[in-house]
């Protein structure tokens, strides 16, 4: 117990590398505060930040017919967030993944957007393939979702997270290595619903760590809507700005 109080997972802030003592946060206070600026101009559809203040929809949402209804992105994909996401994916940092969920909840709370998640029947993380899960040891999006619900002041909040119904049934190339057209083709047919009855008529929040073009989130949304979901909204820890 004393070790858990004194030393958090890995022991260092993921961005500035400062040693962390006597805290349950996985980042130092200075780095946390540097990320807390409210993003004033978001895409009305997917929720990513738009750098041009005169535009209300990002280029991807203008050019694509996404299957999800609306979205929320907690952070832009700047160098500090890149460091965090890299460690979430490749640094064996499951505790940091959960903390990213808490950070996302805090951002929703700060922007008075908690209603975006509180009307949901199910929260479904974007899945990894079996091989990907075995290699990593955990699904960062699942832990992100669990970190998010851990902040909810409702009974059995964690039970709303369903991790085994939407599954990834084929290996795909890393999206980061592909162009926009290739990303769209790469994920077609990659996901499957195992129990449509639990999806039918439900308001669903689909959770992932990062969104670039939204191809993966769109394909997952398409599969969920095809299984009879009433509505799919998306929530990501970070997104590439438009």
Image (cartoon, rainbow, N blue to C red):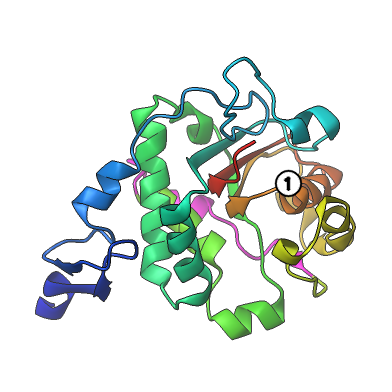
How far across and how far down the image is residue 156, in percent? 41, 51
- Residue displayed at 54% across by 54% down: 161
Of residues 106 and 51, the one nearer the viewer is 51
What segment is highlighted magenta in the picture? Answer: 151-168
165 is within the stretch colored magenta: yes
Does dot 1 land on a helix, a strand or a loop? loop
- Classify residue 201 by image quadrant: top right
- Nearer to us in this view, 25 or 177: 177
Q: Is residue 156 visible?
A: no
Name the spot of residue 80 as percent of width and height, x first.
41, 55
Residue 122: give x, y in percent of width and height.
59, 46
Main SS of the magenta segment?
loop
Which residue appears at 63% of the width and 27% of the height?
43
Count of all numbered marks drawn on residues in the image: 1
Quadrant (top left, top right, bottom left, bottom right) of the N terminus: bottom left
Q: Quadrant of the C terminus?
A: top right
In the rendered image, the vertical position of residue 79 relative to residue 122, given as above or below:
below
Look at 21% across and 49% down and name the residue there: 30
Q: Residues within 10 Å of mark 1 (few under 14, many from 20)?
A: many
The structure residue drawn at horizontal position 82% and vertical position 46%, both measured from the top left corner, is: 222
Q: Is residue 204 magenta?
A: no
Left or right of 183, for residue 93? left
Q: Which residue is mark 1?
A: 213
Locate residue 205 relative to residue 98 in the image: left or right.
right
Q: Is residue 143 visible?
A: yes
Q: Is residue 50 above or below residue 161?
A: above
């Amino acid at each position: 117990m004393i070790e858990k109080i004194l030393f958090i997972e890995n022991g260092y802030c993921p961005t500035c590398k400062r040693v962390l003592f006597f805290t349950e946060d996985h980042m130092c206070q200075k780095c946390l505060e540097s990320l807390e600026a409210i993003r004033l101009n978001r895409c009305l559809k997917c929720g990513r930040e738009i750098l041009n203040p005169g535009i209300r929809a990002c280029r991807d949402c203008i050019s694509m017919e996404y299957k999800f209804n609306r979205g929320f992105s907690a952070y832009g994909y700047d160098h500090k967030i890149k460091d965090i996401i890299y460690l979430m994916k490749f640094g064996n940092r499951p505790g940091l993944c959960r903390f990213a969920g808490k950070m996302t909840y805090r951002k929703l709370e700060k922007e008075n957007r908690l209603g975006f998640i509180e009307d949901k029947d199910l929260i479904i993380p974007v899945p990894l393939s079996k091989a990907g899960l075995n290699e990593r040891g955990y699904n960062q999006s699942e832990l992100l979702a669990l970190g998010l619900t851990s902040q909810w002041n409702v009974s059995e909040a964690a039970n709303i997270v369903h991790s085994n119904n939407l599954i990834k049934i084929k290996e795909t190339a890393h999206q980061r290595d592909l162009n926009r057209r290739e990303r769209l083709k790469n994920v077609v047919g990659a996901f499957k619903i195992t129990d449509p009855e639990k999806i039918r008529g439900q308001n669903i929040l689909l959770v992932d760590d990062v969104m670039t073009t939204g191809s993966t989130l769109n394909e997952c949304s398409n599969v969920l809507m095809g299984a009879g979901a009433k509505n799919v909204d998306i929530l990501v820890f970070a997104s590439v700005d438009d």
